[in-house]
Structures are given as C-alpha cells and as structure tokens.
Image: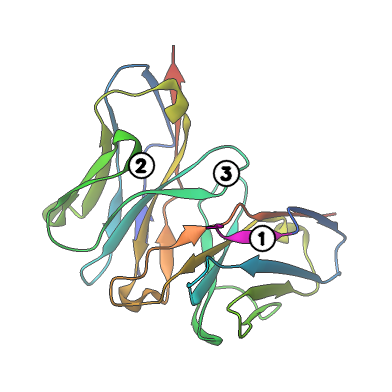
Amino acid sequence: AQSVTQPDIHITVSEGASLELRCNYSYGATPYLFWYVQSPGQGLQLLLKYFSGDTLVQGIKGFEAEFKRSQSSFNLRKPSVHWSDAAEYFCAVGEYNFNKFYFGSGTKLNVKP
Amino acid sequence: DAGVTQSPTHLIKTRGQQVTLRCSPISGHKSVSWYQQVLGQGPQFIFQYYEKEERGRGNFPDRFSARQFPNYSSELNVNALLLGDSALYLCASSLAPGQGQETQYFGPGTRLLVL
C-alpha cells in the first residue's frame, strides 16, 4: 500500500540556519510528490511539486526539494530559515491520475530567534 | 482570481446529527477532492470527484457521501455523526486528474466539532 513517512514530528532551528525536512514514500510506480505548508488554523499551501524531469525542484519562499528514487525520498530544504517559516509541513504522494492522494503525518517547525 | 472557498468555516453538531459541507473550486477547475484532518495528523483522503463522477474513495464508512454539481462545486455529507468525526475538513480543487494537471489547491477548511 502507498504510504508517506515523515520521521521528524518536531524540529527546532535557529533563524538563519539551514533546514532539511525528511520525507520517505512507498509507491509502486513513479510518484508524483508534493510539499505543502500549513500555518495554524489555515489550509494547505503548495510549496513545490515533482512530476518528472530534473530531480531538484525549486519552490516558493526559497524552498527546494530533491527526489532520490534509490532512497524513496523527497526531502525539503531551505538554506536560511526565517521566523515566518514556523508552521507545519506535509509531504504528499499522488497516484497516477490522482484518484488518491496520501499525506504524511507532518513535521512541525519551530524557529528560534 | 478567488481560491477554493468552503462554507461554513466552523460548525458544531451533536452525535447522531447530519452535516453538509460545501466547496467551490477555483474557476476552471473540474476536479474536487475532500480530506479529513484530525488534530495532530495529516489529511486523510475521503473522495475525489471529476466531471460530477466519483473517481476515487478513501477508507471511510458509507456515512460519508459527496456529490459534484454541474458548476463543479461540491458537497460533502456526513450522516449519524460520531465524536470521532470532529476534524478539519479540507476541500481541494485541480484542473483534472492526469496529464500533469493534478496539482491540488486547498481551501481554508471547515472545522467540525461533534459534541
């Protein structure tokens, strides 16, 4: 069965430090991969997506993610975190033709001043 | 352009009651999906509709049903509410399933509390 694992429930980083959020997926075919961010009480905002092609994808707000098929991973990175990045981040996998969409359990990011 | 809109924003019901949640997709989007997000967890897929037909269903009981209208808006119905149905219900729209148009854009959600 398809699944998405985000191993880190909470992460705290200092403002200006680099960030990497981990995501591992289980899916039999080529996955469609997404990262979303959710601020408290808000819906989900798309950060970036991978469908095919270049395995390093750029997103909004200075985020990037790298698809590594051999590791079944799609980790999210940002070189310098800002206080406004504090939120919950979700990795998701979409099935071909998107009849179903699977989310990880999320990683809560805290940013220290 | 307006994003995905959902109504109501908040709702309080008692066990056994029925509830209807509404969603309007982004203009031009023909696919709508529904998700349940329980506090502290990631969203769980409930339904996907495209061109008024159900295209996918998650592991939810038959108490959950949905439909899509000719204008592509959608309703999610939940019957015989249980305490465990308390959650944020998210609607997402996309152009269409397949062909690289699957990116889903989410609404702000409806927060349902069942007492």
Which of the marked residues, 1 or 3, is nearer the chain's N terminus? 1
Q: How many numbered marks are there?
A: 3
**Circle 3 SS class:** loop
- Residue B70 in the image: above or below residue A29: below
* Residue B91 left/right relative to A30: right
Which of discs 1 and 2 lies nearer the camera? The answer is 1
Task: Please name the amino acid that badge 3 sits on.
Answer: Gly
Q: Residue furthest top?
A: A113
Q: Label 3 belongs to which residue?
A: B40
Magenta residues, start to end: B1-7
Q: Of residues B47 and A73, which is closer to you in this image?
A: B47
Residue beneath the point at 43% across and 63% down: B104
Residue occupying image coordinates x 62% and y 46%: B39
Host chain of mark 1: B
* Residue B82 point in image, percent of width and height: 77, 64
Give me the C-alpha separation between circle 2 and circle 3. 14 Å
Disc 2: which residue: A7
Amino acid type for the residue under numbered disc 2:
Pro
Residue of label 1: B6
Labels 2 and 3 touching (C-beta < 8 A): no
Is B77 drawn above or below residue A16 in the view shown? below
Does residue B58 appear in this view? no
Decide whether residue A50 is among the magenta residues.
no
The CA distance from mark 1 to mark 3 is 21 Å
Work out whether disc 2 and disc 3 sit on a shared chain.
Answer: no
